[in-house]
Every structure is written in structure tokens, then in C-alpha cells.
Image: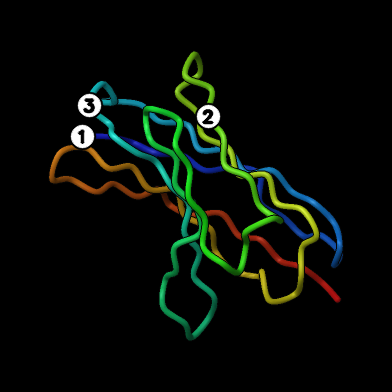
Amino acid sequence: QVQLVESGGGLVQAGGSLRLSCAASGSIFSITAMGWYRQAPGKQREFLARITTGGSTNYADPVKGRFTISRDNSKNTVYLQMNSLKPEDTAVYYCNALRGLGSYWGQGTQVTVSS
């Protein structure tokens, strides 16, 4: 099992920045990739960004150029730096880890962007 704990969400004005953190624990030795998703009220959960154990990254078009995913292997933590935030970025943000056939999720952290 893999446990994921997100932090760093909050209320920010449009144009501002936030950095989300996701700390992984448990059976993390075989994690192949970690990523971030979000879910706004009434909408499906959507992919935002992913980083592999090799450091390769990919982003969804809506956040490309504004969000940056990174990792600190010494802390078993993945980050999502979010800049130029827009009201439409308001959502619950979830961390995800892929390990073998398993997909693990954190509890989510709320991000609210005011106009």
C-alpha cells in the first residue's frame, strides 16, 4: 500500500501562486510515476501533470506553462508549483501514485482562486 498526503492548498487571488506538496509513505519502492489531478464541482476529475521516476514530465494543455511538477526523492515528496492562477483553477487537487497495477490517491486539498 501507498499512502499519500497532500498539503498546501488554500485561498489565493487570481494571478497568484501556490505550491502543493504530496508526501508518499508505505510501499513506495516500486512507484513508477506520481501525478496531480483536480476535480471541480460538477466536473470529472482531470489530469494535470505527471513525473516519472526517471524525471520525465508531461502536462495537460490547460496548465502547460503555468504549473510545474517536481520531486524531492530524499523526502519522498512531489510538488506542484502553480503560477498565474485563474478562478477556473478552483478545485480539489489530488495526488496520485502508480505502482505496478495499483493506483493510489491522496485525500485531496482545496484550492480556491478568487477573481
Give percent across and percent down for residue 12.
Answer: 81, 60
Q: Is residue 72 left or right of residue 11?
A: left
Helix, strand or loop at label 3? It is loop
Give percent across and percent down for residue 59.
Answer: 52, 55
Type of amino acid at the residue the image marks with label 2: Arg
The residue at the far top in this view is 74
Q: Quadrant of the C terminus?
A: bottom right
- Upstream in the sequence, badge 1 or badge 3? 1
Identify the residue at image location x=22%, y=37%: 99
Q: Is residue 22 left or right of residue 85?
A: left
Give percent across and percent down for residue 26.
Answer: 28, 25
Give percent across and percent down for residue 49.
Answer: 49, 52
Q: Give residue 1's mark.
A: 1
Q: To which quarter of the image does residue 32 belong?
A: top left
Identify the residue at image location x=40%, y=30%: 24
Identify the residue under disc 2: 71
80 to 39, vertically: above or below: above
- Upstream in the sequence, badge 2 or badge 1? 1
Q: Nearer the viewer, residue 42 or 62?
A: 62
Which class describes the residues within 10 Å of circle 3: few (<14), some (14-19), or many (20+)? few
Q: CA distance from mark 1 to mark 3?
A: 11 Å
Residues at discs 3 and 2 in contact (Cβ within 8 Å): no
Identify the residue under disc 3: 30
Type of amino acid at the residue the image marks with label 3: Ser
Type of amino acid at the residue the image marks with label 1: Gln
Image label count: 3
- Upstream in the sequence, badge 3 or badge 2? 3
Identify the residue at image location x=49%, y=13%: 74
